[in-house]
Amino acid sequence: MTLHTDAELREHAETLGVRFRNARHTLVTAESCTGGWIAKTVTDIAGSSDWFDCGMVAYSYEAKQAMLGVRPETLEHQGAVSRETVIEMVSGALVHSGASIAVAVTGIAGPGGGSPDKPVGTVWIGWKRRGGYAHAQLFHFDGDRDAVRRQTVGAALRGLETLIGTP
């Protein structure tokens, strides 16, 4: 997976902003392992208030439940880093915002927290349009904490570009 520079992430966000604005869509982010980095990347773009609704950073189980409606049973049985959790996160982000498109991320950025089943670099990303079905993808990123988080932001933005379609 490519490690994106700040300039490359900014370029992705600028392209995304044009597409969102032209399609009259708005974005909500629900972030765990990236700690708001996706929201920061898109709001670094002048004029992002035209297409960015809000961002939610939910690290703890309690925050995922309260802010995004993730079910306690999902967290207990599947864990925070799972397809089921990211689907509930992305769906909850749309329920709790006025946005038309959502992205959610949950993962293990490291350096600790990994396990044999879910090693450091394991990240789930989910995307959803209001009224549509959620799509989730599993990634295994390499590198240190910053590298895993940076690659997650890049993959999230690329997925949004795919979801919104060609200009």
Image (cartoon, rainbow, N blue to C red):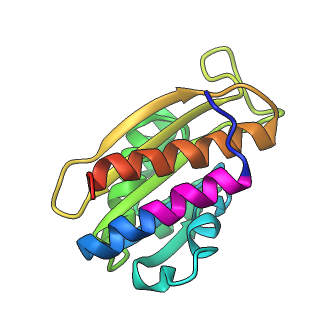
As for residue 45 lying within the magenta part, the answer is no
Q: Quadrant of residue 15?
A: bottom left
- Tell which of 148 and 113 is nearer to you: 148
As for residue 8 lying within the magenta part, the answer is yes
Q: Quadrant of residue 120?
A: top right
* Residue 7 sits above or below residue 110 on the image: below
Predominant SS of the magenta segment: helix
Q: Is residue 34 visible?
A: no
Residue 26 point in image, percent of width and height: 35, 74
> Which residue appears at 26% of the width and 76% of the height?
24
State the quadrant of the C terminus. Answer: bottom left
Q: Residue furthest top?
A: 116
* Residue 133 sits above or below residue 19 on the image: above
> Which residue appears at 79% of the width and 39% of the height?
145
Q: Quadrant of residue 17?
A: bottom left
Residue 118 point in image, percent of width and height: 62, 23
Magenta residues, as a range? 6-15
Residue 80 point in image, percent of width and height: 55, 42
Residue 108 point in image, percent of width and height: 67, 36
